[in-house]
Amino acid sequence: MPDRRAVFFDRDGTLMEEVDYCNNPADVRAIAGAADGLARLRAAGWMIIIITNQSGLSSGKITQVQYEAVNAELIRQLDGLIDAVYFCPDAPANPTHRRKPGTGMLDEASCEHGIDLTRSWMVGDKDIDILCGRKAGCRTILVETGYGKKHLSAGAEFIARDVTSAIAIIQEFPQQS
Ligand SMILES: [Mg+2]
């Protein structure tokens, strides 16, 4: 039985400042306080995983090399506190099980890392993040950074000002043993 706990984070607008189809590491700005918050999660035993839709890869707005460079820069700014990254290049016009709000990436992470999705959390700035987390059985938090203020009615269990506040909610929530 999978028994590890994870916090799944959307990338753009959640862990880093929103940049439309970011393809340049020089444009990467981690959300203030994110690295410190992730360090607290790590110390408390949580796995930390990025779940990101990157349709710019299939539309040609971002190359694979640019995508990797942006990720590497973000992870550097987050002090390396990311256990895994799952990305989906599929276009929004062609919804797939992997592209959020599909749960494919969470299912893969669960299989590959032995994660119990019902003891895990999904944090993001869009309705598709919240829907994905809910369908997978995770608890959900909408952050108000990125596009968050436009998605306040997405049905998240919690709404947080930013990733730091979201992490505080997770840490204060009574955990199932
Ligand atoms: Mg986002």
Image (cartoon, grey):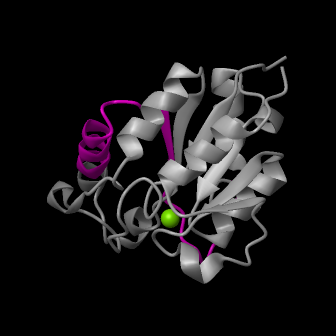
- Residue positioned 59% across, 44% down in the render: 168
- Residue positioned 53% across, 33% down in the render: 48
| Residue 54, percent from left and from top | 45, 61
- Examine the structure image and report whether residue 170 is included in the region drawn in magenta: no
In this rendering, does residue 100 appear at all? no
| Residue 146, percent from left and from top | 45, 71
| Residue 104, percent from left and from top | 70, 48
Q: Please count the marks in the image.
A: 0
Q: Residue 25 occupies which quadrant of the picture?
A: bottom left
- Residue positioned 64% across, 32% down in the render: 6
- Residue positioned 55% across, 73% down in the render: 148
In this rendering, does residue 125 appear at all? yes
| Residue 153, percent from left and from top | 74, 78
Q: Residue furthest left?
A: 26
Q: Judge by depth and name the residue closer to the eye, 150 or 104.
A: 150
Q: Judge by depth and name the residue closer to the eye, 5 or 175.
A: 175
Q: Judge by depth and name the residue closer to the eye, 4 or 86.
A: 4
- Examine the structure image and report whether residue 79 is included in the region drawn in magenta: yes
90 lies above or below 169: below
> What is the quadrant of the C terminus in the image?
top right
> What is the quadrant of the N terminus in the image?
top right
Q: Residue 118 occupies which quadrant of the picture?
A: top right
Q: State which region is magenta.
A: 68-97
45 lies above or below 96: above
